[in-house]
C-alpha cells in the first residue's frame, strides 16, 4: 500500500479547499480567465493568427497551456515512474534485510523503515495524482502573472468542483455490496443466454452496462462495469492484448453509452440546456448511433479475439456462499443512488444525502461490505486537477473548433478530446457563435467518440482505470490504452457519421 498517496491526495484536496476560506467575497476587477469575447482577433487571419494574437495579448495563456502539456506528457510517463518506485523500494528492502542479518536478529522492536524516495516515486507515478501535482505549478504561475488574490479567487470560486465531488459520491455508492449484487444478478440473466461462460459475461457487461450510463450516470456505470469485469473476466488472466483491448472497448462504450438521454453524460449536459436538446432529440439523433456503435465494436473485438475468449474457463475456485441481501436494504441503496443522480448539480444535497447513507450503512453493517473511499477520492482529486487546468485552455480550443466544417469538426473534437475532458470541449462549443445543427451534432458526436483514447478524455475513465489497474503489472500503459481504444473509436466514428 502506498503510504504517501492518501496523504498527498489529502494535501492536494486541502490546497484546493483552503482558498475558499480566504478568497474575497467580490470578484476581481478584471475577470479571470479573460473572457474570450474581449480578444481583438484579426478578422480573416486564420486560426494560427488568432492564437498568436491571443498569446501576445495575454502571455499567461502560453504558461498555462505549457503547464497543461507537461501534465499530459507526465501521464504517459506515469507507468515508468511507478516502475522506478518499485525498483527503489526493492533495493531498500534488500538493504534492510542485509542490515538485519548483520545484527543477527529479525525483529528489533522497531517498525520497518519505508523508502521515502520509493514512496515519492509511487505518488508521482499515479495517474490520478498527476493533474493535482501540476495544479500546484499552475497556481504558482497564476500568482506570478496575476497576483495572489486572483489565484485564490480562481481556484476557490471560479472553478466548479461539482463533477469531481459527484464522482466521488457516486463511485462510493455504486461499489457497495447491495448495488453490486443487484447489478450482477441483472447481468447474470443476460450472460445466462450464453451459458454463463466468461465470453458471455464479457459481452453482456460491455453491452448493457454502458447503456445504463444514460440513466444512472456514466461514473456509476463505469464503476459497476469495471468491478464486474474484474471479477468475471480480468481475474481469469487473459493475455495483455486482450486486457488492453477490453479496457479500451470499455472506455469507448461508456463514453457513448450516456448519450441516450440529456441528463447523464457530462459532455451532453454542457450543451443540452443551451441548445434545447431533450430526451427525444438525444435518442433520435444520438441514441441509436450509440447502440449501433457499441454492438458493432463488441462484435468486431469478439471476432478478433474469438479463439481466446471462447477458451476462457470460469474460475475453479469455489466462491464462498454469501448471505443474501434483504430486498429492502437493496431498495434503500437504489433510492440513495437515485437521489444522488437527481441532485447531481447540487453538492450540498448529494453530499448531505451521502452522510445519511453512511449512517444507514453503519446500521445495516452485517449486509454491507467495507466502504473504501480511497479510489473515489483519488479519482475526485484527478478530476479536480483537470478542471483547474481545463478552465484555462479555452483561448486556443475555441478558435480551433470555430474554424472547422462538419467532418473536420468531428475529427478535431475527437482528437482534442484525447488531450482534454470531453465535457470541456462541448462547453467551449457553446461559446462559438452561429453553430448550425449539423455542426452541433458533429462536435458532441466527436467529443464522445474520442472519450476512450486516453484516461483524461472522459470523466469516468480514471474510475475504471483505478479499479482495473491492479491486473496490469506495471500499471496501465497510455499507449496500450490508446491502441486498445483505437479500433472501437473508428467503428463509433463510422456509426455516427455514416450510418
Image (cartoon, grey):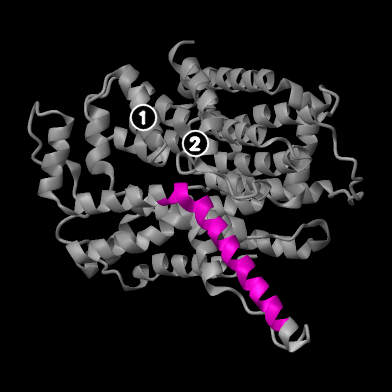
60 in the magenta segment: no
As helix, strand or loop, the secondary structure at mark 2 comes to loop
Q: Position of residue 218 (x, y in %)?
A: 56, 39
On screen, 56 above or below 354?
above
Q: Residue at x 53, y 24 (%)?
A: 487
As helix, strand or loop, the secondary structure at mark 1 comes to helix
State the residue in front, 169 or 461: 461
94 in the magenta segment: yes
Q: Is residue 346 visible?
A: no
State the residue in front, 252 or 453: 453
Is residue 31 rendered to the left or right of residue 305? left
Q: So how many labels did they put on this image? A: 2
Q: Residue at x 66, y 20 (%)?
A: 304
Q: Quadrant of residue 450?
A: top left
Instruction: Give the prevailing secondary structure in the magenta stretch.
Output: helix
State the residue in front, 171 or 92: 92
Q: Which residue is mark 1?
A: 413
Q: Quadrant of residue 272?
A: top left
Labelled disc at residue 265: 2
Q: Is residue 243 visible?
A: yes
Q: Residue at x 27, y 48 (%)?
A: 65
Q: Residue at x 41, y 26 (%)?
A: 446
Q: Position of residue 407 (x, y in %)?
A: 34, 17
Q: Which residues are magenta?
A: 74-100
User: From this viewpoint, which residue is outermost toward the front?
Assistant: 102
Question: Which badge, 2 or 1, comes first in the chain's sequence?
Answer: 2
Of tags 2 and 1, the one toward the viewer is 1
On screen, 134 above or below 237?
below
Amino acid at each position: 500500500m502506498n503510504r504517501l498517496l492518501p496523504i498527498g491526495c489529502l494535501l492536494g484536496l486541502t490546497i484546493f479547499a483552503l482558498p475558499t476560506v480566504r478568497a474575497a467575497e467580490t470578484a476581481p476587477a478584471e475577470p479571470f480567465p479573460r473572457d474570450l469575447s474581449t480578444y481583438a482577433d484579426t478578422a480573416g487571419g486564420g486560426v494560427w493568427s488568432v492564437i498568436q494574437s491571443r498569446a501576445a495579448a495575454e502571455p499567461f495563456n502560453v504558461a498555462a497551456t505549457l503547464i497543461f502539456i507537461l501534465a499530459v506528457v507526465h501521464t504517459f510517463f506515469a507507468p515508468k515512474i511507478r516502475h522506478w518506485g518499485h525498483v527503489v523500494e526493492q533495493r531498500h528492502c534488500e538493504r534492510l534485510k542485509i542490515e538485519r542479518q548483520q545484527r543477527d536478529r529479525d525483529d528489533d522492536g522497531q517498525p520497518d523503515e519505508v523508502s521515502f524516495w520509493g514512496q515519492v516515486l509511487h505518488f508521482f507515478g499515479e495517474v490520478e495524482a498527476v493533474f493535482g501535482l501540476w495544479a500546484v505549478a499552475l497556481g504558482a504561475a497564476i500568482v506570478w502573472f496575476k497576483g495572489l488574490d486572483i489565484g485564490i479567487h480562481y481556484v476557490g470560486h471560479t472553478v466548479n468542483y461539482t463533477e469531481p465531488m459527484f464522482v466521488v459520491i457516486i463511485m462510493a455508492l455504486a461499489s457497495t455490496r447491495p448495488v453490486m449484487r443487484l447489478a450482477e444478478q441483472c447481468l447474470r440473466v443476460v450472460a445466462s443466454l450464453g451459458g454463463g461462460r466468461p465470453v458471455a459475461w464479457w459481452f453482456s457487461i460491455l453491452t448493457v452496462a454502458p447503456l445504463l450510463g444514460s440513466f444512472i450516470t456514466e461514473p456509476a456505470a463505469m464503476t459497476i462495469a469495471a468491478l464486474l469485469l474484474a471479477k468475471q473476466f480480468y481475474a481469469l488472466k487473459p493475455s495483455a492484448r486482450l486486457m488492453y483491448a477490453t479496457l479500451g472497448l470499455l472506455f469507448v462504450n461508456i463514453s457513448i453509452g450516456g448519450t441516450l438521454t440529456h441528463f447523464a453524460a457530462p459532455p451532453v449536459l454542457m450543451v443540452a440546456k443551451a441548445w434545447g436538446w431533450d430526451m427525444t432529440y438525444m435518442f433520435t439523433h444520438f441514441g441509436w448511433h450509440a447502440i449501433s456503435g457499441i454492438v458493432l465494436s463488441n462484435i468486431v473485438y469478439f471476432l478478433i479475439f474469438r479463439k481466446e475468449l471462447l477458451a476462457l474457463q470460469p474460475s475453479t475456485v469455489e466462491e464462498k456462499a454469501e448471505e443474501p441481501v434483504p430486498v429492502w436494504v437493496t431498495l434503500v441503496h437504489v433510492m440513495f443512488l437515485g437521489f444522488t443522480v437527481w441532485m447531481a448539480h447540487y453538492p450540498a444535497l448529494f453530499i448531505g444525502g451521502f452522510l445519511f447513507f453512511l449512517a444507514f450503512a453503519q446500521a445495516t453493517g452485517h449486509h454491507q461490505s467495507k466502504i473504501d473511499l480511497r479510489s473515489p477520492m483519488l479519482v475526485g482529486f484527478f478530476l479536480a486537477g483537470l478542471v483547474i487546468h481545463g478552465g484555462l485552455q479555452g483561448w486556443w480550443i475555441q478558435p480551433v473548433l470555430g474554424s472547422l466544417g462538419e467532418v473536420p469538426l468531428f475529427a478535431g473534437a475527437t482528437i482534442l478530446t484525447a488531450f482534454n475532458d470531453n465535457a470541456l470541449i462541448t462547453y467551449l462549443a457553446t461559446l462559438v457563435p452561429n453553430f448550425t445543427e449539423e455542426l452541433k451534432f458533429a462536435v458532441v458526436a466527436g467529443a464522445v467518440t474520442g472519450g476512450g483514447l486516453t484516461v483524461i478524455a472522459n470523466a469516468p475513465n480514471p474510475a475504471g482505470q483505478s479499479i482495473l489497474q491492479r491486473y496490469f503489472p506495471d500499471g496501465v500503459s497510455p499507449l496500450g490504452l490508446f491502441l486498445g481504444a483505437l479500433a472501437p473509436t473508428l467503428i463509433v466514428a463510422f456509426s455516427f457519421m455514416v450510418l
